[in-house]
Amino acid sequence: MQVKLRVYASLAEDTGMDVADNYGFQIEPGTTVSQLLQEAGINQRDVRIVMINNKQADLDTEVRDGDEIGVFPSMGGA
Amino acid sequence: MAARILRVNMTKLQTEWQNFPEKYKMLGGRGLTSRIVADEVPPTCHPLSPANKLIVAPGLLGGTTAPQSGRISIGGKSPLTGGVKESNAGGVIAQKLASLGIRAVVVEGEAPAGELYVLEIEENDTRLRRADDLAGKGCYEATDAIWDRYDTKAGVVIIGPAGEMRLTAAGISVTDPNGSPGRFAGRGGLGALMGAKGLKAIVVLTDKTFAAPYHDEKRFKAAAKRFVEVLRKNPVSGQTLPAFGTNGLVNVINEAGALPTRNFRDGRFEGAEKVSGERMAQLIKERGGKTGHPCHPGCVIKCSNIYNDKNGDVLVSPLEYETVWALGPHCGIDDLDAIAFMNRLCNDIGVDTIETGGAIGVAMEAGVLPFGDAQGAIELVKEIKKGTPLGRIIGSGAAVTGQVFGVRRVGVVKKQHITAYDPRSVKGMGVTYATSPMGADHTAGYSVTVNILRQGGYVDPLTAAGQVDISRNLQVATAVIDNLGLCIFIAFSFLEQEDSLGLLLEMINSKTGSRWTEADFTRLGEEILQTERYFNRRAGFSEAHDRLPDFFAEEKLPPHDVVFDVTPAELNTLFNFRQEVRKDAGKAASLR
């Protein structure tokens, strides 16, 4: 399965990945967001917000073929 | 020093000190401005009439060592909405007023036609000085002229040409610790009210910052110190906000499909990353600007910034999320430098960036200029300062612009423009926009926190269930935070760290000698909202005004293809507070 991962804010700084760029990953069926983050070298304890295809999701959500996943640390503002 | 109110009569050109009424003891900031509006302003008066009053009030904790206690509330009957209005800003003025024992400045009447004044406030003296030389001057030039005049560090509250022209998108600027006029009580057209009084500026001449009196200073300072630690420990107030400012939200809200794009046509903007907080922080660093900038002494969150242009010269401070959205994605503009330049123009002219961006988006909808035309948008903002008919239309806000150009898709509630969260895909915000007594106001009940940011729980942003309860709870809590004069960003600790509320109560009680519990906190929030609703009802507002524009219920928003489906009946339950609604809400003497 092919999925795309986008990282933001301090997660991009910590990993050296570019903000909002699509990073392609080849994964096995049944892979969770948590497992995907591990493969991407992202510490899941730093992740507060997970979105799959622009919808809210969780670390234990299973990703599906073609999904686009966006992850953020704790964010705020107004 | 006894607490006092400064009364300013612009008709008689006289000022007078008044002892602070005991019945207002626990009120400050928004609680006080809204209460004085309800007590003293005829609800049906024209907002520009001499009977309306401009009220400037630091919060209950203003001038103390409490972190984030520098918010200044400015209130009156809104020239934009026709209802009660409180708009608050950072900057230095709240702490200076509170340090002089001044709980409120109340300006009434109107100066003789064609005359313009500056109100000078010193600890034991006040003067109204003719200021015709400042007429028509932008906020930057006029503030510089005021700073040149006084040898002490003056705190300045000032209007630009938009306020003098009495345009309904006009805001009021407050100087920051650098003397820059970048902090704005932007919303609701209060600049027009100040202009109608013939008042160009209020200048507070004191170096005092943390000199407000305490009931128990030792107890207070211990609690304030612990609260600083709580804020620093919180990942939002301690890390994200200082690093990316409020503009860190662009990518989050865009990723959630809730970033209103091209006048609410889409929830995703293809140029989002180019105007994001991450990009902004990178440019600030490259150009020698500053992130982690405090907007008032004692601010430990430091979400403000100084944004420089390509040559490394200061362009604007701060550059904020709502402004970036209004002048950016809402107009299809992805050029951060153009947005920052328009922000500077708006600050100089003295207009609300949100309302101005809203109006430009509506003008784009009407075909006055195409979406994405940054240069055209800049020219349109410049028209406001010139006072041309087109400039005056834009400077009167989105509702007027839509009316003049025959546009129906206008995202306003009570004539005030919605902000950077589409109500169809962040439904709690739709409830707040619809029901806040202030008109569409994101700060009044910021459901984004639980709908999107997962701070303080989670409620699905795409379904109607539960949104009224979230909005109600947040509107009540926010009213109290606004009463205390605290920055709303303390709420992120409030939602996540259990000791926050206890520390706040400890600060309130050791400041005032009261014995408040959590129940009093809630009761005060409800009373403030009831007071505001009471004024609005007498001004002619009904449940029919607590609604979003039709198109949000009719047009599906991509990418989620959702409409706003919280029903009118559900919206009507927002103000069903747990306690029995007090019949004498408008007269309710707040508290012991």
Image (tube, grey):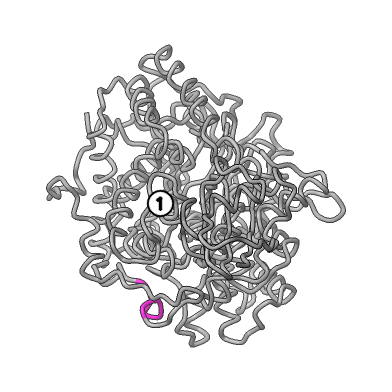
Q: Splitting the image into 4 quarters, where does residue A5 fall? A: bottom right
Number of numbered discs on residues? 1
Q: What kind of residue is marked 1? A: Val
Residue B122 is left or right of residue B244, and the answer is: left
* Residue B358 on image: x %, y %: 54, 70
Location of residue A47 in the rendering, given as x and y in whole percent from the top left corner: 55, 46
The quadrant holding residue B42 is: bottom left
Q: Which residue is mark 1?
A: B450
Other-residue count near label 1 (Cα within 10 Å), few / some / many at <14 / 14–19 / ≥20:
many
Q: Nearer the viewer, residue B291 or B115?
A: B291
Verify whether residue B423 appears in magenta. no
- Asked if the stretch drawn in magenta spans residue B551, the answer is yes
| Depth check, front residue: A48 or B44 | A48
Check the image and name the residue furthest to the top.
Answer: B218
Q: Chain of mark 1?
A: B
Q: Nearer the viewer, residue B233 or B474?
A: B233
Magenta segment: B548-553
